[in-house]
Amino acid sequence: MSLAEQALSYVRAISPYQPGKPITELAREMGIPVDSIVKLASNENPLGMSPKAREAVEKAISGVERYPDQFDLIAKVAGRAGVAQSQVVLGNGSNDVLDLIARVFLAPGRSAVFAQHAFAVYPLATLSTGAELIATPAKNYGHDLAAMRAAIRPDTRIVWIANPNNPTGNFLPYADVRAFLESVPKEVIVVLDEAYNEYIPPAERVDTAGWLKEFPNLVICRTFSKIYGLAGLRVGYALASLEVADLMNRVRQPFNVNNLALAGALAALDDHEFLNASYELNRNGMAQIVAALERLKLEYIPSYGNFVTFRAGDGAAVNQKLLKQGVIVRPIGGYGLPEWLRVTIGTERENARFIEALEKAL
Ligand SMILES: *Cc1c(COP(=O)(O)O)cnc(C)c1O
């Protein structure tokens, strides 16, 4: 009998996550220099990390012989969100937090609801517990909240919502999300993943943390991987009711966020100059890429994130032609969108490289 046959059948059934292609991998494959490659595949911050965060990380290197202390980052996150410190759960990236929620509430015989074309980690987190995944059809490539509400069964414990969604960039009006929270049974956890929250125009942004008082079944997830530019450090967090946060902390590895990540995240929260620059760069870059897509008469999904998804025709073929020119974007056939490609907004020069390569590829 093979070892695979000894494994849990629901683990064997999981299809592996496909990350964006690393620059170094394309360089090896195509024999092109690393410096000539443009990677717009993983929604990373094209400005790099905040200088303040870099300084803090460098300082924290002396101290890595000690186990980390999460206190300062939790205190700052709680203060900013206006919640109690015991309502904050830190994660090794927000993916870690998604996993913690799944481990607390899911198991074989239970189910979770998510939307077609929603973030790939929701199926992973769900299926790794042996719970059943209920996928509802997308509406205009985004979440259909009415269909999601209707899909909730007595054994459903979690509903996963990404707002904005990755990889489609769709944004649900806050009023709709609130109405959804009001409509779901109180014992169903609603995970509101706001990884791209900081890219939403401030005038349109609503402070969802303020909803936690009313909805103890709400769990909000945020990350330092996107606008804060710390994807490689791995740090994110959940805001939850005291009861749910306490449960999540019971299954959390005590030292799940390392010293460098804690220091970097703490400093990044205060680097308003860097955050504003990142926000502005994204706005301008989005306009630059969208204008090119319109000029090329390519359909795209209006996006509230730091990326935009467009219909390339044969997504795999266009992707190959982009790779040959040293441009890495994200094919999303695995999301059920084989004709589409997702491109992360880069610097003006990176965007121009992408546009030029795309024109050649079409
Ligand atoms: C990028 C992303 C995250 C963040 O993942 P990390 O583990 O924090 O790097 C979470 N949710 C969505 C929808 C994302 O696109």
Image (spheres, rainbow, N blue to C red):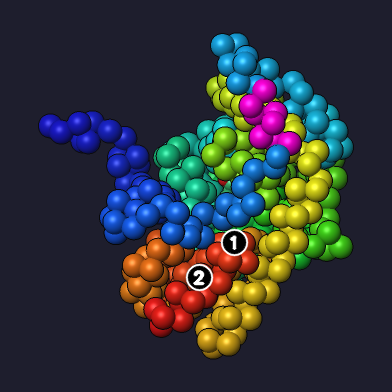
Which range of residues does the magenta coloring cover?
52-59
Picture quadrant of residue 348: bottom right
The residue drawn where x is 75% and y is 48% is: 274
Q: Is residue 336 visible?
A: no
Nearest the viewer among 155 and 221 is 221
Query: In the displayed structure, would residue 225 be above or below residue 258?
Result: below
Tag 2: residue type? Phe
- Is residue 54 a member of the stretch shown in magenta? yes
- Is residue 215 a member of the stretch shown in magenta? no
Relative image position of residue 152 (x, y in whole percent): 59, 55
Residues packed near mark 2 inside 10 Å, few (<14), some (14 to 19) or many (20 plus): many
Relative image position of residue 253 (x, y in whole percent): 55, 22
Q: Is residue 18 left or right of residue 196?
A: left
Label 2: state its secondary structure.
helix
Query: In the displayed structure, would residue 317 be above or below residue 46?
Result: below
Tag 1: residue type? Gly
Q: Are marks 2 and 1 in contact (CB under 8 Å)?
A: yes
Label 1: state its secondary structure.
loop
What distance separates the C-alpha of mark 2 from that of mark 1? 9 Å
The residue drawn where x is 38% and y is 74% is: 318
Residues packed near mark 1 inside 10 Å, few (<14), some (14 to 19) or many (20 plus): many
The residue drawn where x is 64% and y is 26% is: 58
Relative image position of residue 297 (x, y in whole percent): 54, 88
Nearest the viewer among 344 and 83 is 344
Nearest the viewer among 127 and 327 is 327
The residue drawn where x is 72% and y is 66% is: 283
Q: Is residue 362 visible?
A: yes
Residue for badge 1: 346
Residue for badge 2: 354
Quadrant occupied by the C terminus: bottom left
Q: Is residue 135 left or right of residue 254?
A: left
